Image (tube, rainbow, N blue to C red):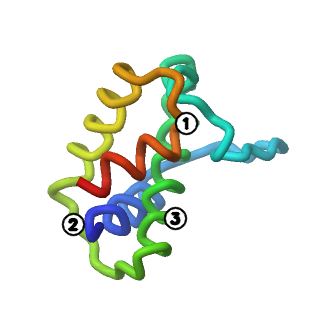
Amino acid sequence: MTRTLAAAAIAALFLTVPAKAETVDLATVKCSELADMKPDDASFMFAWMLGYSGGQTGTTTLDLTSMEAVGTEIGEYCAANPEVGLLSAATEVMSQ
């Protein structure tokens, strides 16, 4: 779980997400929607999920080396399980 907080912090530093007036409930986003997202939107959601996971586990460390691998694993999991919720997929991948 240490990789989750690390990824969130790095993503927050490097992401440039334009301000939007929309609210997204990540508990309702399906894996199938990931493929249709703009890269900035997917990156922002990924960063949020990593931060959320770190907050849930109380993780305060940052593992920069695993950040890209986690994103790839979530993408692969979602490709194989399109009807699973994105947040559930991220939780499943990051708990391994």
| Discs 1/3, front | 1
Q: SS class of the residue under badge 1? A: loop
Q: Which residue is mark 1?
A: 85
Q: Secondary structure at mark 3?
A: helix
If you read the primary sequence from the N terminus, does the residue marked by circle 1 or circle 2 appear first?
2
Sequence-wise first label, 3 or 2 = 3
- Residues 79 and 19: in front is 79
Amino acid marked by disc 3: Tyr
Disc 2: which residue: 63
Q: Find residue 9 and report its image quarter.
A: bottom left
x, y percentage for residue 14?
42, 54
- Residue type at mark 2? Asp
- Picture coordinates of residue 16, whole percent (x, y): 54, 47
Residue 52: image tag: 3
Amino acid marked by disc 1: Gly
- Cβ–Cβ below 8 Å for labels 1 and 3? no
Q: Is residue 18 left or right of residue 15?
A: right
**What's the CA distance linking mark 1 and mark 3?**
15 Å
Q: 18 and 79: which one is in front?
A: 79
Measure how far apart labels 1 and 2 are at the Cα level: 25 Å
Q: Residues within 10 Å of mark 1 (few under 14, many from 20)?
A: some
Residue at the extreme left of the image, as rendered: 65
75 sits left or right of 82 in the view: left
